[in-house]
Image: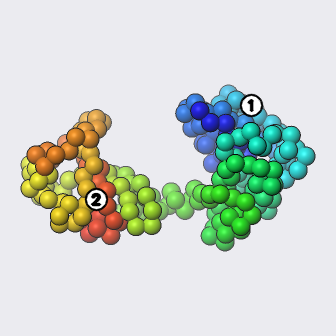
Amino acid sequence: MKSILLIGLGRFGRHIATKLNELGHEVMAVDHNEERINDILPFVTSAEIGDSTNEDFLRSLGIGNYDVCIVAIANDFQSSLETTSLLKEMGAKMVVSRAERDVQAKFLLRNGADEVVYPEKQVAKWAAIRYSSDHLLNYVELDDTHSIFEVTPPQSWIGKSVGQIDIRKRYNINIMAVKENGKMNMNVTPDTVLTQNVTMLVLGEYKALQKCFHI
């Protein structure tokens, strides 16, 4: 369990708060809007109404006590930048800030952010890749060149074993697991036969995955 300071309770911030609550973390939520604070109270450990660009208010929260500080402020980049900078000056261990554009990310990273997230950009990329493919059901980007895809086997693979397909030798792709009826089987061997009802979790370079599954 981690102690997390979450600043900004728009749609993005609210989703973060509810998910952190599900995961069992302690969350201190901050926003200048009283209605947003009241709405989030059932899902957080505590909450404060206040201006995160106010140095005295921010210091009163005990910044050094949090494992992670998340700046989820939307539609006010100046406030996001000032808050990020103040958090780091006050000894925040880890600051994660929201950006909407690359230029914002550069400023945030230069002024205290340890990590930057792009909610709209990341979801847009996921949706574009996911829905432009017949085989792809989900994917996780590991770095600039490697990904994990959840895919349905091409029709020509149905009824064949992993060894017969030899995807590693042909494409340098690893089958990490197969999933059937929601159950994950990590014990994939050359004798594992692919059926019509399974999906596969495959790991490799994005270009190799794209070529293999015609994405």
Q: Is residue 10 above or below residue 182?
A: below
User: Residue lying furthest bottom in this view?
Assistant: 103
In the picture as drawn, the residue positioned furthest to the right comes out as: 56
Residue under label 1, please give it.
46
- Relative to 60, is 12 above or below? below
Q: What residue is drawn where x is 81% and y is 50%? A: 90
Q: What element carries label 1?
A: strand
Left/right of residue 194 with respect to residue 137 in the rendered view: left
Q: Position of residue 204 (x, y in %)?
A: 31, 61
Distance (Cα) linking label 2 and label 1 = 45 Å
Residue 115 in the image, given as x and y percentages of width and height: 62, 57
Is 215 left or right of 19, judged from the image as shown?
left
User: Helix, strand, or loop for circle 2?
Assistant: loop
Residue 151 visible (yes or no) = no
Residue at position x 79%, y 62% in the image: 78
For marks 2 and 1, the one nearer the N-term is 1
Classify residue 178 as left or right of residue 165: right
Above or below 87: residue 173:
below
